[in-house]
Image (tube, rainbow, N blue to C red):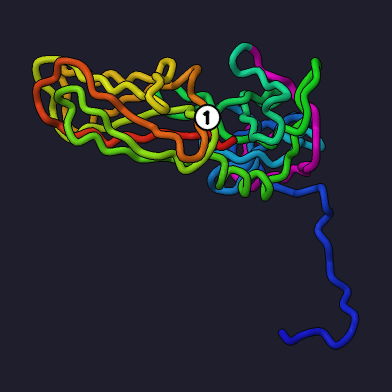
């Protein structure tokens, strides 16, 4: 095509309404959270990985007996109020501007549901407001994907030996909150367990200790810790892991700090 030399009638897809094809064996209720799965089909909000929040269903569509793509659904983008989670996953005004994560087709949470160091939830949208009756969430797939790209940083740290009481250090390239610490070992342990204690500027991170079990140990074993406090970092802060325990074999551990950006 060449550049225009006259006015053009350019077609527009409705700005806030998307038409998506449903995944197989899926029932989506009107007013529920709609997500896109890894193959591009619409499914309901749920606790699962590999999904991305799209919007709110404009109507009920039942594809329970159908194959993927048999039926379509209209999904509205924009800001909608959905249900909040409870306890440690309850969203507060301090979370405005951050992603929220789908729990079910009407509920969102502040975290991705880390369990044994592995996420269990997919991002639903961006938090824009909180009140007693629910959370105001911006549902827009393109914006959400762009935010997610930069929302977390992973800082690697190689521990040369799990024997002794060595301290291994790295500088944080970002400001934020350490939400996960993980390690994988390159060889077996003997005699006893090894530990890695995470610190920020020499101050221990609350619940930031990795315990690497000697019994049955093998290269590739993974361990995780999820900090609960004393886990806020600034750009340039020293992050460290201190070796402990009674292991007697000089195995290497490759570790990381997962930081949720401020």
| Magenta residue check for 80 | yes
Does residue 52 show up? yes
Name the one closer to the observer, 139 or 10.
Answer: 139
Q: Quadrant of the C terminus?
A: top right
Which image quadrant is residue 63 in? top right
Q: Position of residue 41 (x, y in %)?
A: 61, 45
Q: Residue at x 81, y 58 (%)?
A: 13
Q: Quadrant of the N terminus?
A: bottom right
| Magenta extent | 62-86
Q: Position of residue 173 (x, y in %)?
A: 46, 43
Q: In the image, is residue 141 above or below residue 190?
A: below
Q: Which residue is mark 1?
A: 177
Q: Residue at x 67, y 28 (%)?
A: 95
Name the one closer to the observer, 193 or 28.
Answer: 193
| Magenta residue check for 200 | no
Q: In the image, is residue 103 above or below residue 260?
A: above
Q: Residues within 10 Å of mark 1 (few under 14, many from 20)?
A: many
Does 77 sit left or right of 41 as displayed?
right
Q: In the image, is residue 219 above or below residue 104?
A: below
Q: Residue at x 81, y 47 (%)?
A: 17
Q: Residue at x 46, y 40 (%)?
A: 236
């Amino acid at each position: 095509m060449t550049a225009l030399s006259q006015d053009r009638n350019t077609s527009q897809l409705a700005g806030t309404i998307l038409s998506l094809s449903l995944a197989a064996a899926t029932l989506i209720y009107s007013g529920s959270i709609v997500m896109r799965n890894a193959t591009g089909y619409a499914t309901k909000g749920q606790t699962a990985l590999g999904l991305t929040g799209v919007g709110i269903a404009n109507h009920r569509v039942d594809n329970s007996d159908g194959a993927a793509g048999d039926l379509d659904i209209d999904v509205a983008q924009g800001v909608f109020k959905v249900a909040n989670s409870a306890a440690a996953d309850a969203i507060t005004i301090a979370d405005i501007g951050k992603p929220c994560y789908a729990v079910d087709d009407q509920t969102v949470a502040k975290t991705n549901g880390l369990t044994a160091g592995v996420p269990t939830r997919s991002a639903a949208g961006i938090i824009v407001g909180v009140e007693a009756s629910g959370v105001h969430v911006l549902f827009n797939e393109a914006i959400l994907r762009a935010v997610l790209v930069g929302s977390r940083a992973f800082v690697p740290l190689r521990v040369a030996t799990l024997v002794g009481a060595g301290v291994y250090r790295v500088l944080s390239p970002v400001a934020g909150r350490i939400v996960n610490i993980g390690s994988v070992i390159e060889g077996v342990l003997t005699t006893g367990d090894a530990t890695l204690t995470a610190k920020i500027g020499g101050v221990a991170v609350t619940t930031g200790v990795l315990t690497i079990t000697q019994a049955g140990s093998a290269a590739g074993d993974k361990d995780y810790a999820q900090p609960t406090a004393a886990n806020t970092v600034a750009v340039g802060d020293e992050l460290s892991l201190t070796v402990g325990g009674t292991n007697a074999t000089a195995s290497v551990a490759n570790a990381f700090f997962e930081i949720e950006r401020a």
